Image (spheres, coloured by chain):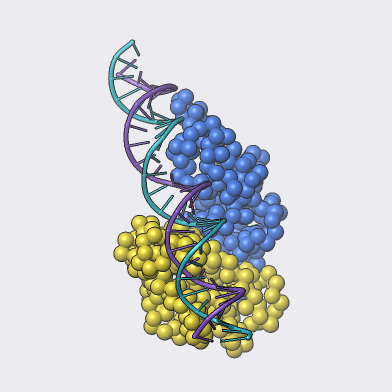
Chain colours: A yellow, B blue, C purple, D cyan
Amino acid sequence: MTSSLPAGLRERKKAKTRAAIRDHALRLFEEQGYAATTVDQIAEAAEVSQSTFFRYFPTKEDVILTDDYDPLIVEAIKAQPPGISPVRALVNGMRTVFYNLSPEEWESERRRQAIYQLVPELRARVMNQTVSAIDMLAAALADHDGKPHDDVTYRVIAGAIVGVILAVAPLGGRDGEGFQPSDFAEVEEALEILEQQFRRG
Amino acid sequence: MTSSLPAGLRERKKAKTRAAIRDHALRLFEEQGYAATTVDQIAEAAEVSQSTFFRYFPTKEDVILTDDYDPLIVEAIKAQPPGISPVRALVNGMRTVFYNLSPEEWESERRRQAIYQLVPELRARVMNQTVSAIDMLAAALADHDGKPHDDVTYRVIAGAIVGVILAVAPLGGRDGEGFQPSDFAEVEEALEILEQQFRRG
DNA sequence: CCATGTTTTGACAGTAGCTCTCACTTCATA
DNA sequence: TATGAAGTGAGAGCTACTGTCAAAACATGG
């Protein structure tokens, strides 16, 4: 999704400006911290005016709040072979998406997460997004099992899955390392435990 | 918890000021909306200065972000008879706490929730709190089953439970009614479904 | 190539949340 | 009642964010 067709000059410049703002913002956040970095500094580094900054990102927070992967995961779930459990369908879907990221996308994602893990207000908004994704996930899982979208059971399962992911994600400053590749394995392990809970009596 | 012993005059005045600020803030939020209400207005209505407002509440958000019930629920869980499942232990604990609230506390809680359900930034911070409570819940559940606090299984179960609660809570503006007594029944039903998922094969 | 209209941008002013300082008042206590 | 601590108010200052308006960059038809 990062690279659409070149299209007109206007579009290209826009994409360039947007990328410049985000890159400089990420760099400044890493160097000075999130709170200590002002929008003016970012704008100056990216060589645009403050107005332009807010035209591209409604708030300072939005610079690192963009998450483009959820829809991809939903599609990957639907593409899973029938008959496997909701949890496995999700895990496979996540694998499909994350293991196909380019090194640049992976690195950018890592930097993003490293920052918002450290800033409570950002974490809060990411969680808000994540929880809002329960709807999408519930629909996708129900779809995969050929059940109606509003089946409460799938809403519960989706909620449980998201809850487990939140539970094992490095929140609350447990270790200040941010999101490493190994953490994805942690998420998989936790979901495996959930799957076992769903299986036994 | 609202009414401690009277203690000294200073303590009483402090509690009174705090209550005044919060009450006027709630009223103004209900009348004009959260964003449209300025801290100055709240301060004026409560007859204190802006400085004093921020001395009692670090941010405007904090006025409606106080949640005193989680620790009570944790205690109620520990007091449950042994042998029942984690989910049931939690549901019983929640019942114990909520059904013992005074009408004033219940009403105040209802107003609080009605407001933050409508304001995304507030919802985000409430979720942050809620997710942070996974730690406490996991420890309480493990404790109840006589297992060590860092048992990953209980972390997963706690995460699943909290996820389910978030999933059925009226987020994302599904119906603008706020949190009604009936919604607690919804939460119980959803957790019942989770319990069933945990039970079958 | 040029004139036209649209989009993007920058400068500027203004609002409000939040912090900090400092002097003044109110309360506790010895 | 004297002394110190805690609570308060006034005001200045920083920054995120919004809105307006005119200039510049770009697209398009002739």
> Total marks drawn?
0
Q: Does the rendering let one see residue B58? A: yes
Residue at 55% from the left image edge and 71% from the top image edge: A161
Nearer to us in this view, C14 or A46: C14
Where in the figure is residue B185, as x and y percent of width and height?
69, 56
Nearer to us in this view, A45 or A89: A45
Image: B187 above or below B29: below
Where in the figure is residue C10, as x and y percent of width and height?
43, 64
Which quadrant holds the C terminus of chain A? Answer: bottom right
Q: Quadrant of residue A45?
A: bottom left
Image: A111 above or below A93: above
Residue at 48% from the left image edge and 42% from the top image edge: B57
Horizontal relation, residue A27 to residue A88: left or right: left
Nearer to us in this view, A160 or B26: B26
Where in the figure is residue D18, as x and y percent of width and height?
55, 56
Residue at 66% from the left image edge and 44% from the top image edge: B31
Residue at 55% from the left image edge and 34% from the top image edge: B44
Image: B46 above or below C11: above
Where in the figure is residue B53, as x and y percent of width and height?
48, 38
Q: Does the rendering let one see residue A26? A: no
